[in-house]
Image: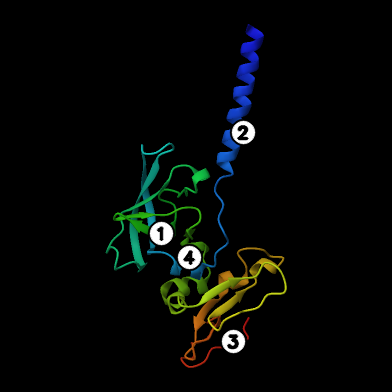
Amino acid sequence: MQSLCHQLLSLLFVFSSLQIYQLTEACSCALSHPQDAYCNSDIVIRAKVVGKKLLKDGPFGTMRYTVKQMKMYKGFNKMQHVQHIYTDASESLCGVKFDINKYQYLITGRVFDGKVYTGLCNFNQPWERLSLAQKKGINHRYQLGCNCRIKPCHYLPCFVTSKNECLWTDMLSHFGYPGYQSRHYACIQQKEGYCSWYRGMASRDKTTINSTDP
């Protein structure tokens, strides 16, 4: 009888381990250029996370982070000020973890029922780790390209198929993701309706953009 109990306990342990492994592998996100993350978000803010509380709803709960908003870049039509950010408490369900009273974060998210939700598949980074071009993109440049489409290129050959596309080739580089285009370029629409990569090292020409760079 004891032997049978031990076998059952062993099977239960193995099954539980498999379940835990499956949960830790559950969150999977497609690669996204920061401009797409900006354009597809309802809310984009820079904020410091000053507190957190686990809310007991659902199987793993929801983590509610209290933030001190420094600046809002997008979302004025949704709310004037963000005080709380909500995310799944479990990383296996794409919940994101923020350090308390450590960094100012760029936080992007969607609004549901008056609450801001974010996760691992959103673009959330310590502000100090962003490149200068990314900061300028968040401030205004990315908004200029929200009608453009950034087309990922994972394997050669790759081609643009419409005038509003920019070919994103970071995944082909041996540096991997995030790559040079992610950190230093925005896909901006020109007057003629064409979209092209813009680095923005110099003052932007309001009529033309160098479509060969990169």
Q: Name the residue under label 2.
A: 18
Q: Along the polypeptide, which appears first: circle 1 or circle 3?
A: 1
**Which amino acid type corresponds to the residue marked 1 in the rendered image?**
Gly
Q: Considering the numbered disc 3 on the image, is that residue within a helix, a strand or a loop? A: loop
**In front of the other: 177 or 5:** 5
Q: Considering the numbered disc 4 on the image, is that residue within a helix, a strand or a loop? A: helix
Position of 161 relative to 78 (above/below): below
Q: Along the polypeptide, which appears first: circle 2 or circle 4?
A: 2
**Which amino acid type corresponds to the residue marked 3 in the rendered image?**
Ser
Q: In the displayed structure, does residue 111 sit left or right of residue 156?
A: left
Task: Measure how far apart labels 2 and 1 are at the Cα level.
Answer: 31 Å
Q: In the displayed structure, does residue 2 sit left or right of residue 135?
A: right
Mark 1 neighbour density, 10 Å: few (under 14) some (14–19) many (20 or more): many
**Which amino acid type corresponds to the residue marked 2 in the rendered image?**
Leu
Location of residue 74 (image quadrant) = bottom left
Q: Name the residue under label 1.
A: 109
Residue drawn 50% across the image and 81% down it: 188
Q: Considering the numbered disc 1 on the image, is that residue within a helix, a strand or a loop? A: strand
**In front of the other: 183 or 77:** 77
Q: Mark 4 points at which residue?
A: 37
Position of 26 relative to 167 (above/below): above
Q: Along the polypeptide, which appears first: circle 2 or circle 1?
A: 2
Disc number for residue 190? none
Q: Along the polypeptide, which appears first: circle 2 or circle 3?
A: 2
Position of 130 relative to 202 (above/below): above
Q: Are marks 3 and 4 in contact (CB under 8 Å)?
A: no
Q: Where is residue 62 in the image (x, y as percent from the top left)?
A: 39, 43
Task: Measure how far apart labels 2 and 4 are at the Cα level.
Answer: 33 Å
